[in-house]
Amino acid sequence: MKELKTKVCRNEKIAPGIYEMDLRLPEDIEFRCGQFVNLSVGDGAHLLRRPFAVAFYDRGKRIIGVCYQVKGEGTKLLSAKKEGDELTCVLPLGNGFSIAEGQKRVALVGGGVGIFPLLSVLGEYRESNKYFCSCMGFRSREYVNTFSLFDKRSDEFLAATDDGSFGVKGNAVQLFFDNYDGAKPDVILACGPTPMLRALKSGLKERNIAVPCYVSLEERMGCGIGACLVCVCKRSGKEENARVCKDGPVFEINEVEL
């Protein structure tokens, strides 16, 4: 984990209210897919950094890509950043995803901005012998983004929208279970809103599916290093809580309450 100064290379809207920002790092950093970065917003009035999943990393150019949704003053300030602007960041943070050697078939299930950590999985393992079935959910056609990257890097890419304007009508979890027999996953990796992950957990239990499943949780964070306890979540069957930023953000799906 390091605190570094970065420079904005690109900051463009890719869907309504959603931006992709590319940042050049001053040195090479070891990343694992699913890890995140705490990024300043470049304004002294907003001291807390914002956590964003690293969607991709070009090691040769030392450029990381983060995608974010404009929700408050901090992300609104970020959306106005231009090429050459300097921001500070702390990275890499969190435990990230890992896929065991024997897990050859991988299902990715993502909804909303939860698709971005899963994009990093495809980036890290694209030269491996894994088979990827990606099931992504969007609000509507106009919110569909990073389609070409998922389509190019996945062996099978399936999309759903709430209104049926792109792909099939429904959500990512429904899409995944409808195509489960074709995917035949050895492991499931998922990220999205808590109701989505809760539905995934319930669906696995109802269908008696015992395939390992790991989820990346979306929580508000303050420090990003486990000190402030803003992002705690309950561990299943235990009294102590887990810190999403420090102990996660990736957990085995039955390890935490959703």
Image (spheres, rainbow, N blue to C red):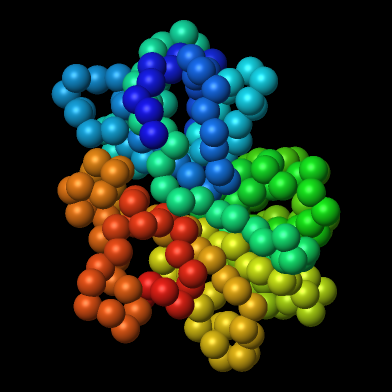
Residue 6 on image: x %, y %: 43, 17
Which of 177 and 87 lies nearest the eye of the viewer?
87
The reply to whether residue 144 is in sight is: no
Which of 203 and 93 lies nearest the eye of the viewer?
93
Q: Is residue 106 above or below residue 115?
A: below
User: Quadrant location of residue 123?
Assistant: top right
Relative to 183, 199 lies left or right: left
How many tags in the picture? 0
Residue at 50% of width from left, 78% of height from top? 201
Which quadrant holds the N terminus?
top left
Relative to 176, 73 lies left or right: left
Which of 110 and 23 lies nearest the eye of the viewer?
23
Q: Is residue 139 above or below residue 207?
A: above
Q: Is residue 198 above or below residue 168?
A: below
Residue 38 on image: x %, y %: 36, 35
The reply to whether residue 141 is in sight is: yes
Residue 140 on image: x %, y %: 60, 54
Furthest toward the top, the residue is 84
Residue at 60% of width from left, 51% of height from top? 118
Which quadrant holds the C terminus?
bottom left
Furthest toward the front, the residue is 101
User: Quadrant location of residue 134?
Assistant: bottom right
User: Quadrant location of residue 47?
Assistant: top left
Residue at 71% of width from left, 71% of height from top? 186
Residue at 34% of width from left, 51% of height from top? 245
Residue 27 on image: x %, y %: 51, 18
